[in-house]
Amino acid sequence: MGWVTNQHCRRWKTSITIYGVAFLCSICFIFFTPIISRSPNHHYFVDMRNLFGVPNTLNVITNFPFLVVGVLGFVLALDGGFFNTSSRGEVCGWVLFYGGIAGVAFGSAYYHLRPDDHRLLWDTLPMMVALSSLLSSLVAERLSQRIGLCCLIALIFSAFLCVAYERIYNDRRFCMMFQLMFPLAIPVIAFLCRSKYTHSRYWFLSTGIYLLAKFEGATDRNLYRLNKYTISGHSLEHLCLALIPILLAVMLIYREHKFQRLVDHRDRPLRD
């Protein structure tokens, strides 16, 4: 009984430390950086070819992998028996994650057909929902189901607030901070908190791919010139990001319990 109590205290201390550090970093980012307004250059992509009558063709069609992976992952996560999960909090997080990935396909394709400030919302929000769900799934797995569900609700609510703030005040700092938080928080939680599953390295691989994708997007023109104007860095960013839900699906399918965890009444398995 004392061991279980100590484990709960350790989890709460870890979660409070992580949230406290994240909050302090957020405050510093907001107070020590100038307002970052939307710019017309944000909607300029180097590859603007019109193939088959589709504007910005490659930037549009490279969203198709998100649709395939998102729908398949959503169905498998909703089934509850194909992915190796042990609590409803984990299942809820993964269902919303793959649902968000499917939403990215529609939102990003819609935006790239005619990039502007009004359509940017539909490109940004689904990805922020997917990232929120991903982080909450990790928290539910490493800390507890209750903390994971609270994290899910708080992050999705924050995602909507960040998008609304950007639209109203023309300030992208909160959205940028929100998206930059995840490649920092996920490896920290995965490293500090012990996992009950195998295949934990997939969390770090996914973080590395996310950072690589962001690098490709930032070097859009240079990569386009480097590969002799075949595919732009932004299109490569789409394809690279689509690898993340594939990797995580492989992890969910093949991972196993490393040890039998004591399950309390707040974190019950889906089936006996």
Image (cartoon, grey):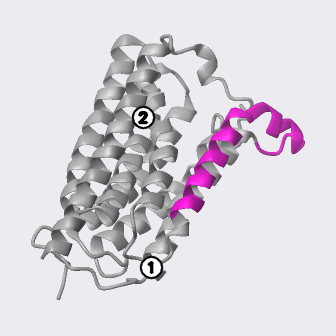
Residue placed most toward the observer, 11 or 238: 11
> Which residue is drawn at the image coordinates 90% and 42% (left, top)?
228
Dominant SS type (magenta): helix
Vertical placement of residue 200 versus 111, above or below: below
Q: Nearer the viewer, residue 8 or 174?
A: 8
* Circle 1 residue: 253
Q: Which residue is mark 2?
A: 178
The residue lying at 36 percent from left, 64 percent from top is 74
Picture quadrant where residue 25 is located: top left
Give, as a single range, the part of the protein colored magenta.
Answer: 203-231
Q: Nearer the viewer, mark 1 or mark 2?
A: 2
Say the numbered circle drawn on residue 181: none
Outermost residue on the left side: it is: 265
Q: Nearer the viewer, residue 100 or 145?
A: 145
Secondary element at tag 1: helix
**Which residue occupies 31% across, 23% down?**
164
**Quick one: quadrant of the N terminus?**
bottom left
Q: Amino acid at mark 1?
A: Ile
Whether residue 99 is visible, yes or no, is: no
User: Picture quarter containing residue 81?
Assistant: bottom left
Q: Is residue 247 left or right of residue 82?
A: right
In the image, residue 89 lies at what x, y percent?
A: 23, 63
Query: What's the residue type where badge 2 is placed?
Result: Phe
Residue 224 on image: x %, y %: 81, 38
